[in-house]
Amino acid sequence: MVNLRRIVKFFIRVLVVFSLMAGVFSYADEKMDSKNMSGDVALENIMEDGLKVATFAGGCFWCTESDFEKVAGVKEVVSGYTGGHIRHPSYSDVSDGTTGHTEAIQVYYDPEVVSYGHLLDVFWRHIDPTDPGGQFVDRGSQYRSEIFYHNDTQKRLAQASKMKLEQSMVFNKPIVTAITRFVEFYPAEKYHQDYYKRNPTRYKYYRWRSGRDKFIEKAWKNHRPMDKSKDKGSDTMDGDAIHPEKEEDMMKKEGRTNDMGSNMEKISWQRPHDSEIRSKLTPLQYKITQQNGTEPPFRNEYWNNKAQGIYVDVVSGEPLFSSKDKFKSGTGWPSFTRPLEPDNIIEKKDVSLFMVRTEVRSRHADSHLGHVFDDGPPPTGLRYCINSAALRFIPKENLEAEGYGQY
């Protein structure tokens, strides 16, 4: 009888836990008030308003969605996937680069207010049409630029627009953006819709670090600007988001530099052969950096390290973070407000564990470092949460001897 009671109590506890989990996920889904365009009803309602649709791929759809939603006459922009060979792909499927899909957007617009030709102009002025391997920091065919036409008129206008761009000599390299017949579009997961509105600080910092706006400004600065009367705004860095010039000023005041034109430029950080990495690293270091692992909080080497110095990649030695930017986050992992050398950091979308996060990796060694969140202190508002096992700390007094004297 006693054992039976224990069994019953156990199953009751299990049911309670599953009920609570179901409630949490249900609540989270209800709170996700972004567009849910996967249903036919939503699409029908849009088209009943007399709107037309255009489909573009220009790299990260967080950015292209933001760009087109600021254009007067555009009523809705949906992030999703198109151009592939499997049905109903997930973000994970597409990000592997094996399905043939590319991140894309569908633009629902009022033809009485804005023309398809103007949307093409907006498209060209927000991408790098000469890049065959992706867009800016995002690499791979899943980030390629492409125009998907829905009818012969769109095809003709797209081809004429591309020819006009080639003749303008804005770019000194061939225009490689393909013009392809539209087949099918699959809306992305809810957490990708309106990302720039939901996570403004994180989005603006990502966009700045991607190099997209710097490229656009440089490419188009000597050419006739886009018709601003049809543009609702721009992706300028404002509010609490860190601005490039402001960061440079702050770094100069601290006696630091973000100039890669120094001795470090002569150093070629490289990823060693896998056999060398395995022999060089401890089992924990290998698990963290090579298998995307996570070490336990408060039980790692640097979470409470207060010494002055810099943190480099444990595999390649490329400089990553400085003690000047380290702060006490209370999480149990080393936390930094910004990288020491932003060019040595790569950020990738991570949708594991039922959430969307931004993974942080080293550029040259491709080591998994941790994640970055937008709940940090000023001046950036960011928290780079990094695994100690992915880092090697070099004390201030040893910097010169180990070849990091500039820091």
Image: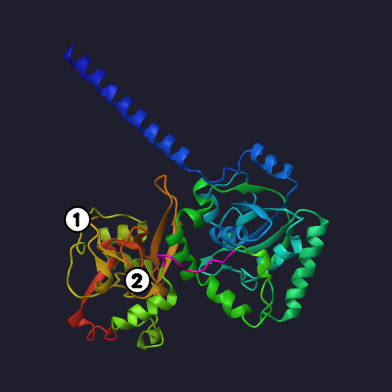
Which quadrant holds the C terminus?
bottom left
Q: CA distance from mark 1 to mark 2?
A: 22 Å
Colour theme: rainbow
Graded by Cα atoms within 10 Å as few (under 14), some (14 to 19) or many (20 or more), the crowding at tag 2 reads: some
Q: Which residue is mark 2?
A: 339
Q: Earlier in the sequence, mark 1 or mark 2?
A: 1
Q: Which residues are magenta?
A: 233-241
Q: Quadrant of the N terminus?
A: top left
Magenta stretch holds residue 239: yes
Q: Secondary structure at mark 1?
A: loop
Hey, what amino acid is under mark 2?
Answer: Pro
Q: Is residue 184 above or below residue 223?
A: above
Tag 1: Cα neighbours inside 10 Å, few (<14), some, or many (≥20)? some
Asked if the stretch drawn in magenta spans residue 13, the answer is no
Task: Tell me: residue 75, above or below residue 275.
Answer: above
Q: Image quarter for residue 44?
A: top right
Q: Position of residue 362 (x, y in %)?
A: 38, 68
User: Where is residue 215 drawn, in percent x and y?
Assistant: 56, 76
Residue 54 is at least partly visible in this image: yes
Residue placed under numbered mark 1 in the picture: 298
Let me know if residue 83 appears in the view. Answer: no
Instruction: Name the dominant secondary structure of the magenta segment.
Output: loop
Amino acid type indicated by mark 1: Phe
Where residue 346 sits, quadrant-wise, is: bottom left
Above or below, 91 relative to 389: above
**Residue at screen point 67% across, 80% down:** 223
Judge by depth and name the residue closer to the eye, 252 or 282. Answer: 252
Outermost residue toward the top in this view: 1
Q: Is residue 391 left or right of residue 148?
A: left
* Residue 40 on image: x %, y %: 66, 38
